[in-house]
Amino acid sequence: MKKHDIIKRVWIMTILALSTSVFAAGKPAPVSLTPEGKKIEAHYSKMLADLKEAITRLEPKVDEMKKAEFTKQFGALENVPPVTQIVMGVERSVKYGPGNPAFAEKQKEVVTAARAVMKDIDAFLVGEKDLATMAKFALLTHATPSRLALFAQKGEEEKALIDQLLNDDKLVVQAMTLGGASGGNYGQAMRNYTAIQKASERSHEGFFQVWALAASLQITNETYVYPDVPAAESLVKYYLNYLKAYDDGILDPAFSELGGTGWNYRFVFPDSYTLEDIDWIRKVLRNYRPDHTRLEYRWRYCRIVRSDIPYTGSVDRSGMPAELSNIQKFFLKGGICGPRAFVGQISGYAFGIPSRRAPSPGHGAMAHWTPDGWTTVLGPHFYFCKHINGMPPMEFLLHSQAQEDPKGFKQVLMCEWLGKALAEDAPRNFGSSGGFWRLLGFYKRQAIVEDQKIEDIGATGAELAESNVSSEKEEISQIEIPEKFRKITVAGDGTITIPVAACKSPKNGEKILFMESIDGGMQVHYGLIGQRPELLSYTVDIPKAGKYEFTAHVCTVTMDRQFLLRVNRRTLVDVDIPYTKADWMDTEPVDLELKEGRNRISFTQYAPNKGVSIKYFKLKPME
């Protein structure tokens, strides 16, 4: 086993061990129901029993021949032989799901059989009169009367939150359509939601309300990111931070239109990153690499991993400044799969792009939303992952696709909720077995995908999972630079400002990329990618011979670097590049001896180099 493979496995095992210890340490001691709590539990239990009885009476009559055909078809899936695929250099056996072409083809026949059944029960599926009853049953089943009572017995405020939820049919339906509360913790979800709605008037309507509720349902531990701050208080800070970023035009243009039921809004807040890191990554992308904010959605924002977080093992971070966060440290020297996935995730989170971790055996990757569907990034396809947000990966993908049709998705839920009321088994092995009604809900999902012509867009950058070399040839696109951004100016004190685009040949190469700045100006990025140094050459007319202080206006995310100036072919000058932490900053002045008239100044970096973005250079007379 290679040394970097050993380091990678140790890294992953360390993360898992730390996660396990954190969960173990944070697990509260068991709490018993008080006498009052038992009364509350009994009330919720009776409510659940009554709802279950009412729902079982709703079961529509199904043609027995069609039911038998559907049962026969999904039963045949178990007989489909597995196939072997090579995934990241390892043989994997695939039996269930689209990774096995024969299985996927056979499932089309199951969907056809399911459609025949659904046609007969159309009146049940399209009627919404009993939707609230079914949703409330699903909520009480998921939460359990005991868990609700444990929360409600804490005090009048807590019981009022549960009562507020259960007495609001519209809210119950919406909450369950959005996937319910993580871990069944509806009390904490209501505490979160109420706090956000109190803090922001806009969270009461439109997508702002959907976002507020979805985030409240997703994050239901007692704390969130900050261990000493209640979750509701932290969520309010995140919501207001993102709301301001939305108002300032920082969040992605698609943020207000994530579509479908609104389920995607569960994943716009980070799973473990501080607001300080979120704000910093926004600055990195907007100042240092604004071109990544304009890419097509597969690589938008997360392309920063490809450009600035090289895959490398044996990284010693012990000597790095203690005040830096882990995310900031990953930019200094790169890392293996975990650090790269973390940076990719937070780059999407920071701009409101729903993101999740997508681990596979021995590898850490990520998944994120695009307008064309979810994609895994820097790792294998969904069907080779271990889990996504606690769900089997292909079920996560299917769920994300089916919820794009809100009306059809409610029919999915009605089938599932009826099956739960009838105590049916859940679907297993991607629809190969399970209870009749719950499987019908599973195949209604697939019918939606067929009807809506929703495509699986596959994995993104899988060849870069553990490599810095892409198997795909990357086209270098050119940019037209307006003449106003190439004009050298002279101030009243004689200071000469040289826009970075005023060079002899402003063309993009492997290392040099010209791009529009966030503020509408022009900047250049000198990147890591590419084997050979590239030059930026400038011709400057100097009115008077003498010494000039040279500075460059730069933005960096790494430290301990220099670039090289070549002046009039003979003089070589090193210029230290400051660690600006993604802010714009001038380099320390260096003295240049320049002649009267035309002077040639060339810029390049030493190899190996780290990235630097530049807006302009200045020459200030020293006399």
Image (tube, rainbow, N blue to C red):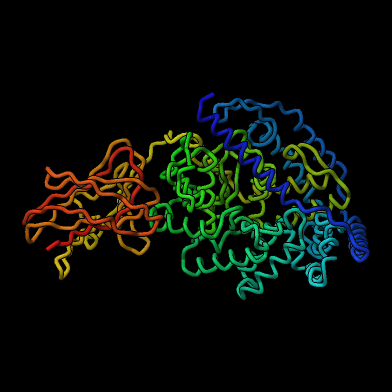
Left or right: 594 as drawn, with respect to 450: left
Percent x, y for residue 202?
A: 60, 73
Residue at image position (56%, 51%) is 369
Q: Is residue 165 above or below residue 352?
A: below
Quadrant of the frame with the C terminus: bottom left
Q: Is residue 139 visible?
A: yes
Percent x, y for residue 288?
A: 38, 54
Q: Nearer the viewer, residue 391 or 289?
A: 289
Name which quarter of the figure residue 154 lies in: bottom right
Percent x, y for residue 209?
A: 64, 68
Residue at image position (23%, 56%) is 589
Q: Is residue 54 visible?
A: no
Total labels: the figure holds 0
Residue at image position (15%, 69%) is 493
Quadrant of the frame with the N terminus: top right
Q: Nearer the viewer, residue 480 or 290?
A: 290
Left or right: 360 as drawn, with respect to 567: right
Percent x, y for residue 45?
A: 91, 60
Which residue of the protein is positioned furthest toward the bottom in this rendering? Answer: 201
Q: Nearer the viewer, residue 575 or 353?
A: 575
Residue at image position (86%, 41%) is 65
Q: Is residue 91 above or below residue 585?
A: above
Name which quarter of the figure residue 527 lies in: top left
Q: Nearer the viewer, residue 365 or 309?
A: 309
Name which quarter of the figure residue 231 lies in: bottom right
Q: Is residue 569 above or below residue 522?
A: above
